[in-house]
Image (cartoon, rainbow, N blue to C red):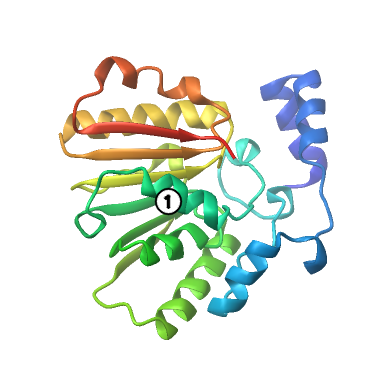
Amino acid sequence: MSAINRIRRSVAKRGAIATLVHGIRTLPTTFSPARLAPEALQFDRERGIDTAQPVDLSNLKIESRNAIYGVQYQPVSTTLFRHALAALDVQSQDYTFVDLGCGKGKALILALEFGFRRLVGVEFAQSLLKAAKENLGVFLACASIQNVSWQLACADAAEYDFPSGPLVIFMYNPFEAPVMLKVAARILRSFHAERRPVHVVYINPTCPEAFDAFSRSETDDFHIYSLHP
């Protein structure tokens, strides 16, 4: 989609003022290795992968009507991820870890290191999904981790059907409110359809109101964890 068409669609959906604000927030930035977070660079070097470089989604070809609501790819902080997952009261080997907006796969690799053995990455940008596949392949080839089942789905999170069984659903601020509201409703429907343990981890929650309905339906099997950087 051309820049002009993206602007037109944004104005139609957000309005002119909101489009201007969004544009300022997401101005493309040239990232050099020296400007990337040292933690992110070290994480990649130690594992022989490439997840540290942020990506502006407006530069990608994305076949989704919700592409306009996607947030720039940026890897989650290793420390932040570990802090968030440590708060979960789960036996990781019993759960499927689902990363909505998995980008280049850093959270999936961290989930493997955290003991999860069933992984699902959901991403609507083909190029990011390709990078995630390469990174997971490199990591698993070098790491001594056994009995891993993983799947990468090129899909819009607002239309994704969650797998059965206990879930940890992870999100690192992957999309704006219009999509987050749909995703939250889909998670709720999935939980009601199959009552099983579900833990939602929402880091940098820019749309926490999407999960207000869960406070009225929460049970011992459903938990929401919001964590600000």
Examine the rendering and report whether any part of residue 155 can be seen. Answer: no
Position of 177 relative to 159 (above/below): above
- Which residue is at a point 46% across and 48% down the rendered structure image? 83
- Which residue is at a point 53% across and 49% down the rendered structure image? 80
Name of the residue lying farthest toward the bottom: 142
Position of 148 relative to 4 (above/below): below
Name of the residue lying farthest toward the left: 195
Q: x%, y% of residue 73?
A: 63, 51
Residues 128 and 106: in front is 106
Residue type for callout 1: Asp
Q: x%, y% of residue 10?
A: 72, 30
Position of 26 relative to 109 (above/below): above
Task: Please name the residue that numbered disc 1 is placed on.
Answer: 99
Q: Residues within 10 Å of mark 1 (few under 14, many from 20)?
A: many
Residues 131 and 87: in front is 87
Examine the rendering and report whether any part of residue 118 can be seen. Answer: yes
- Which residue is at a point 46% across and 23% down the rendered structure image? 210
Q: Quadrant of the C terminus?
A: top right
Q: x%, y% of residue 38?
A: 70, 64
